[in-house]
Image (cartoon, coloured by chain):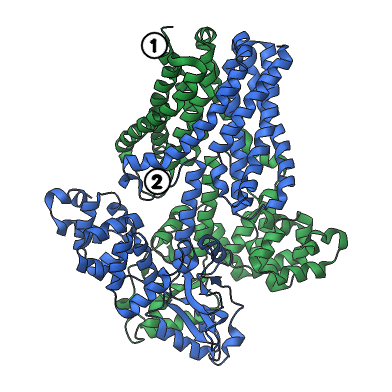
Chain colours: A green, B blue
Amino acid sequence: VRALTDLPRTGDTAAAVALLTSLELPAAIDELERVDDATRALAVAALPDETMVAVVERLDPSLQRDLLARLDHAQAQHLLHALDPDDRVALLDACPAALREQLVAGLEPAEQALTRAVLAHRPGTVGRRMSPEVAAVPMSSTVGEALEDVRAQAASAETIYTVAVVDEANRVRGVISLRRLLATDPHVSLTAAMSRPVTVRTTDDQELAAQRLLDHRVVGVPVVAEDGRLVGVFTVDDAMLVLEQEVDEDLARSGGTEPLDRPYLTTTILGTARRRIVWLLVLIVAATLTVNVLNAFEDTLAEVVALALFIPLLIGTAGNTGAQASTTLTRALALGDVRFRDLPRVAGREALTGMLLGSALAVVGLIPAVLVAGGQVAVVVGVTLVVICTLATTVGSCTPLLVQRIGLDPAVTSGPFITTFVDAVGLVVYFLVAGAVLGL
Amino acid sequence: VRALTDLPRTGDTAAAVALLTSLELPAAIDELERVDDATRALAVAALPDETMVAVVERLDPSLQRDLLARLDHAQAQHLLHALDPDDRVALLDACPAALREQLVAGLEPAEQALTRAVLAHRPGTVGRRMSPEVAAVPMSSTVGEALEDVRAQAASAETIYTVAVVDEANRVRGVISLRRLLATDPHVSLTAAMSRPVTVRTTDDQELAAQRLLDHRVVGVPVVAEDGRLVGVFTVDDAMLVLEQEVDEDLARSGGTEPLDRPYLTTTILGTARRRIVWLLVLIVAATLTVNVLNAFEDTLAEVVALALFIPLLIGTAGNTGAQASTTLTRALALGDVRFRDLPRVAGREALTGMLLGSALAVVGLIPAVLVAGGQVAVVVGVTLVVICTLATTVGSCTPLLVQRIGLDPAVTSGPFITTFVDAVGLVVYFLVAGAVLGL
């Protein structure tokens, strides 16, 4: 690995190339994503043509952009030419608009047209992710004719494992897998052998399309325009990238941060801080609510200081209970196991679950409370635990459903948001219970 | 949808079947996963054969088990026979051992052998997930001969898009895609056209294998035994299921709970509570540490009750900051962007990030502190924020690396765990700073 990390000092590009080509491709990419931008550009520029394209195609998009900016114009243009249209668009998407236009203008007319067709669609849609190089056969063919037809398209098409069957107007009338084509008598008519088409539209959300592909367990789906005409294909490798990006977002947001847009070690510290500060500011402003609640009960606190000892335990437990419910429901929503109309059922289930959990926790929480603060405060802590756990599971479970209903990402309501809300309400409950039990 | 939900009352299986067959397969499954076990069994038993197999194959494993227990023996045996070996094993895995043995014994000898071959491997390994029906061709063939060979295997093989090239001892010497076979001159020798094989072993962890398939962007990889002999194929649809399950686990654990083992609405309330209570108990016991810390500083608290007002804000902020860092690093570890040996670099970066974040938050936190409690307490709050944010990011980022190093799942250290730890330490910092600034 030294051959790569020491490259800026030694200038020995041959050694770096020898290292990278000796590794399996994913391992080579891992190493390249750990070094700084200048070193990476130096090593990649020295790679043999075919390897260079394979490497660049799979680099993180943010690193592709840096790389492109560091290659000379001829190298950049060569690289762009060698990529498949969908990978090319991913790379162009990462470039500033001026450079993008310049690079597209340098492509051959046919490649330029294919690329512009994809770039015309909105980011986040299937149209922007698809490959326009789709394998298609006319529905009037026999299976044997179709197979020959597909064979002729094998060199250029993005995939030939999913073949669209089209009518004279290029509308998709069916789909046939290459496997079925090979396994069927060549004289059978295509219409007898094809299946009902599972398609997606150019305007569809890319995540929904990826999930659709997964649900149908296919390796590709034809992409159609609004009028039903065939315009491309969306394949399983692109679907997996889309879903991985979505998982990235969900995991990051469940931790109250925005996902990084480049590999961790290549981000700057300021860049990392920027992705986190917005949420922290929102949450600290929300947390001033707890200051106000406690301020309102300051006299009670002054009278029974022991009440303060259990504040972190109580709000921590409520936060954890709420986060569990919200995590579970956010995932159930994503998997389609739960819908908005299930709200009353979910609320009922979770209220009961929360009461159960709160009762079990109250038993455990009573022990330190009795030891440290005596029986009366212990009763306050126990009762509060039951009430706030019930509250936390109910709020934690219903919020994701409501948030998705109004069109936002339910993952952002997980963890931190619920916690902060439950903190404030939990404190009010605590002091009300304390007032009642202790007669303050 | 009423045709399905009202089935127990109406007994009109024809209407339920008409509904289910009119839907696309994934939609039909969604509906079946929302009704109770008895209704589901009633509807599935009435489906036409081919649809029944397609439906059962994709049902959640926990629901497959229930279903199997409710079908009569002949139906269960028929169903099992119709499934592919890998789907069959998934279903058998969900059954109690006695029922499993009985069902396997009822299979035809050839099917029984295939099934037992897969069942012999440990759960969680590739061997348990693979399909033994792998397409393979001898390395002495020409491309044309190989293509004919593959064609003959099209009906039985799990996939024919990835073809293993084997020597006389059935060891994998190369891989060739069906696409390459079709696009290459039939007279070329197979050894000239094939690629270096990307394979996985039966004993490999299924998640690592799935990630390998994804990294290489292929739709299948040959599975080899310890001695290099070909024994099966691991395909992209199984890889996607494995990765989805892994995401389920990571998301659940980041929220401090264990993943559900069946769709949300079909779980019992006790089952849901059981998946959550263990973590909550661990966390509440850990939280008694905060009670002890506060107890130790009770005199300080009694003297300056205003200090209590900021406890939730401070520990909440520290918890959020720590959760962000731990979420980011857990994900970076999963993606391979960070390794254990990066620990010093990570700690340095995160300490600096935490200091930056803490300083920004201190400015915001000062405002309510000045208004509610005056200048001196405000200074205490501000200084504490900087210190605990630095601490939280450092601990939050290093813990996942350390936990993975000792062989545990770093996802379990996210959120709740870090929060509870940082709470206790944060409170100590708070009172030490208070003591210094306020001269207590």
Residue underneath mark 1: A436
Q: Which mark is residue A332?
A: 2
Looking at the image, do the residues carrying marks 1 and 2 touch, with CB atoms under 8 Å apart? no
x, y (%) of residue B402? 65, 47
Q: Image height check: is B197 above or below B66? A: below
At label 1, which amino acid type do we have? Ala
| Quadrant holding the C terminus of chain B | top right
- Label 2 crowding class (10 Å Cα cut-off): few <14, some 14-19, many 20+? many
At label 2, which amino acid type do we have? Ala
x, y (%) of residue A282? 57, 29
x, y (%) of residue B208? 55, 61
Tell me the mark number nearer the camera, choosing from 1 and 2: 1
Q: Which mark is residue A69?
A: none
A139 displayed left or right of B426? left
Viewer-proximal residue among B13 and B323: B323
Among all residues in the image, which is located at the extreme right? A10
Viewer-proximal residue among A207 and B193: B193
Sequence order check: which comes first, mark 1 or mark 2? Answer: 2
x, y (%) of residue A238? 52, 61
Viewer-proximal residue among A52 and B345: B345
Q: Residue at x 26, y 58 (%)?
A: B67
Residues at discs 1 and 2 both on one chain: yes
